[in-house]
Image (spheres, rainbow, N blue to C red):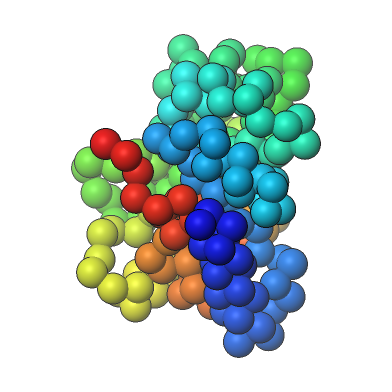
Amino acid sequence: MVAARLARVLALVDGAARSVGRDPESVTVVAVSKGQPVDLMLEAYEAGQRHFGENRAQELARKVPELPGDVSWHMVGHLQRNKVGLVRPLVAMLHSMDSLPLARTWAKGSFTPPVLIEVNLAGEPQKNGIDPDGVGELAGAAVDLGLEVAGLMAIPPFAPDAESSRPWFAALAELSLSLGGTVGPELSMGMSGDFEVAIAHGATMVRVGEAIFGRRER
């Protein structure tokens, strides 16, 4: 079942990319496995999936040894500074850099994977992320600390349909362009319900959970 869902997601990614003249290989699908059992993750792995994303530091650390060593792990959830030492050695990328104190802590390791700056596009108080006006300053400071700021990440406000997210994806892409060379070109945006729209606006990574694994067990 997971293999079939993954195949459908990859087909939709392919179609969405081609429809706007993009190479489908320019889009990485990160299978968000928060709350999912390892056996379902292994099904996705056997079907060819190699990028997995986790929201919680301790769940990430628990699962890493249970999957093959060629998996690329992504920390996609909010990261507390006291969990940096646990997460940093395990991941290929941190998607949720959102403050200078976190950047300073991340930079203290001998191995510092690339980071994406999480942007709170709509200023929602219940969400993490930095205000769009502060992204340039944080990116510059992170670079000065020796970090590779590979790009931006955002989660648009909840919407009942994918089209409602379009302006937010466009806004993140425009913000990235406005920063020039301060940040890299990666755009982590789009989830199970709206990744096709995100790809149309330049998403290079889409974070897909339910569309691959089904609803999480509660």
Q: Position of residue 141 (x, y in %)?
A: 59, 33
**In the image, farthest residue toward the front:** 1
Q: Quadrant of residue 186?
A: bottom right
Viewer-nearest residue: 170 or 65: 65
Residue 4 figure quarter: bottom right
Q: Residue at x 52, y 42 (%)?
A: 40
**Picture coordinates of residue 209, whole percent (x, y):** 45, 51
Q: How many marks?
A: 0
Rendered position, 90 above or below 26: above
Residue at image position (46%, 51%) is 213
Q: Is residue 45 left or right of residue 188?
A: right
- Say which quadrant the C terminus sits in: top left
Viewer-closest of 99 and 96? 96
Residue 155, located in which quarter of the rendered image?
A: bottom left
- Please tell me which residue is depicted at 69% across the width and 16% down the height of the picture: 109
Closer to us: 178 or 60: 60
Residue 218 visible in the picture: yes
Q: Position of residue 82 (x, y in %)?
A: 46, 12
Establish if 176 lies above or below 139: below
